[in-house]
Amino acid sequence: MTHIELRGIDKHFGALHVINDLNLVVEDKEFIVLLGQSGCGKTTTLRAIAGLETIDEGDILLDGKTVQHMQASERDIAFVFQSFSLYPHMTVFENIAFPLKAMRVNHAEIAERVKSLAKTLQISDLVSKRPSALSGGDMQRVAIGRALVRQPKAMLMDEPIGALDAKLREEMRAEIKRLHIKQGSTTIYVTHDQVEAMSLADRIVVMHEGILQQIGTPSSVYERPENMFVAQFVGSPVMNVVAADVGEEDGHAHVNIGGDGLRFAFPTELTGKLSAANGQKGNLSLGVRPEGVLVSREERDGYVAVEAGIIEPLGSHDIVDLKLGEDVLRARTTSGLVPGTGEKVWARIDPTRAHFFDTATGKSLGIAF
Amino acid sequence: MANIRLKGITKTFGNVTALNDLHLEVADGEFFVLLGRTGAGKTTTLRVVAGLEKPTAGQVFIDDQDVGRWGPAERDVALVLQQYSLYPRYTVRENLEFPLKSPIRHYDAADIGERVGRVARTLRIEPLLDRKVDRLSGGEMQRVSIGRAIVREPRVFLMDEPLSALDAKLREALRIELKNLQMNLGATFLFVTHDQIEAMSMGDKIGVLDEGQLVQTGAPHEIYADPINTFVARSVGSPPMNLIDGQLAGSEAVTATGERLPLNGKGKGAGAAGRPLIFGIRPEDIFLEADAPAQARVHDVENHGVEKIVTLRMGENFLHATVPAQTSLEIDEEIRFSWNPDKVVVFDGDSGVNLSHAGR
């Protein structure tokens, strides 16, 4: 099986630095998702691995061998695009069989491999149809089948389900996951959809402006973002990030948000941890996801009185805006907890879910409780 | 500001009945969302209220006046569309001034300047005022479109999927802005969408529209917790309510696949015994527990960070369950589950009608 390594990859399109010193090791059988907005360099990275794009600088290694000078066809890597690149005049069978025919595999084996793959992809009854008779989802199944049929070293997928409608996307996502579990091909998958990334990946690579921001398991990217970009790119609704002023009184630490009087209690160790992490007073931002903002209808110890703004009822839960001076903290509450806009409620920030960032650099100070 | 009332509106286009005896009331200052799929009649309803479409039958009242014979301009409504209908060669300021310079309305220059300034502040587009519209992003353009609608303070606002063309993050932000705006203006909004999240999160009231008729009207939590039929049950919630075929057996629900689940007296006395039924349960009301009564297999796990949505396979049926983010599950793993019996909604298996609504 296959091990992929990128060492110091650089790529420019004119003045645009699309990939900036990218280093990445993909283990055998691993499912890696490159996640980022359009223009972040994720597709260019994928195309460079496939050999569809040259690089300015760096090494691409497949199983320890540098391949950046090899043709795409010599790298033995399969590529699936968002647009279904099928041959319209061929049947589903012929489309899937095509790469094997080009490799002069014998007829019996072709029939065997296409049949087995069609079964896995649940398109057995479609093999004699032409692409024009298929739905979008089935066309993408065929495209995936064609990519997998020659059992490539690695599978590269560029937003393969991005063009499908929501329900079909969910279905195909589940199938891609199941297929990966079954076939175990090393996979690099590109998407801008963070739920897709969180649901598919063994590890997520978050990219922004050509620079790798963080690499880690879905839960580590969600729970321990290394900078403000990752913090606010992953998760919906987005993580609250507000300017924070940390103080201490009578041996208790607090975080001041949105001006005077709104002091959120924190464990005493906060001040020590901040100075150990070189946190600069006046240059701190606090990040907390809506589920880390705790809301109570009654006054409680360690809770601060705030006014509720807009409430978004989503059925299973509500998202409530809490007004803190000029700032707003969004909280996730049980349905109907806060009865209406303008109500006085009490709030607390769960220290175990709080993140502190250097406002100037955006980097996390790595403070955890 | 004003209320809106539609009384028995029918609208046909040739053989197609777009609206079928539609009754609808939007109170003064209310944010009313019409939720429905493509072709349900949402846009036709808005166009009838705006006076752009003449109903085949029925009456339209705005501020308790029958406006059937009034032209669109006389009705004094503002319509915001999904596509930004702005003048690309004009600046933002000129676009905002335009409705105030109409020959049928008379505003003096000072008044126009003041109104444009106020609207620009409200929508946070002041820095863009002297920019040409074709230099703006999608979100900025939609803000200007909304600005152009509110600048002359119409009696009601009609919005036709104004957020649909925007990307997800922007849509989320504008949802809140629009709701804020409506509350600050105290304006009457009739807002049309196919997106249930927009409907749930923005509406004071939701009207679920299907084939030109209102299926159910109510506050978001009423529509969510107590849908009148399986159509409405499927229309709100993401993922939607699970609908499980089965029957009543004593005090238990027995699914078509033979799993038995508790009901706490739900469905009793509605003549439900022995009839084919559909049990509705929201994903957050299904629990995975080692000793729970029912069995299923993990088909897929969708990770949202804050929680996971698990697709369970029970025979040929798929169920969704929301579980804590820390829950560790393998694809194809056998699990056991139960539900919160108090949250089960029982529907008639044939008609799909909620038994607690039947006969009401």
Image (spheres, helix red, strand yellow):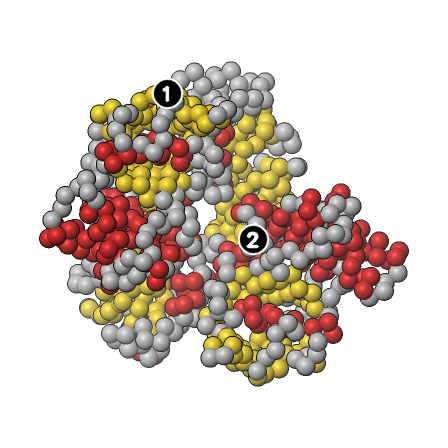
Instruction: State the SS at label 1.
Output: strand
Q: Which residue is mark 2?
A: A163
Give the residue drawn at x 38%, y 74%: A363
Image side of residue A12 versus residue B155, left or right: right
Pinpoint residue A276: horizontal percent, then vertical percent. 34, 79
Residue B25 can be seen in this image: yes
Image side of residue B336 versus residue A40, left or right: right
Instruction: State the SS at label 2.
Output: loop
Residue B262 can be seen in this image: no
Disc 1 chain ID: B
Pinpoint residue B312: horizontal percent, then vertical percent. 59, 43
Say few, some or many: other residues with alpha carbon within 10 Å of mark 2 (under 14 / 14 to 19 / 20 or more): some
Pinpoint residue B294: horizontal percent, then vertical percent. 60, 37
Pinpoint residue B4: horizontal percent, then vertical percent. 27, 30
Give the residue drawn at x 58%, y 22%: B276
In the depicted structure, whether residue A301 falls above or below residue A41: above
The amino acid at mark 2 is Ala
Disc 2 chain ID: A
Badges 1 and 2, same chain? no
Image side of residue B199 versus residue B121, left or right: right
Work out whether residue A266 or residue A70 is closer to the camera in this orientation and state it. Answer: A70
Mark number displayed over residue B57? 1
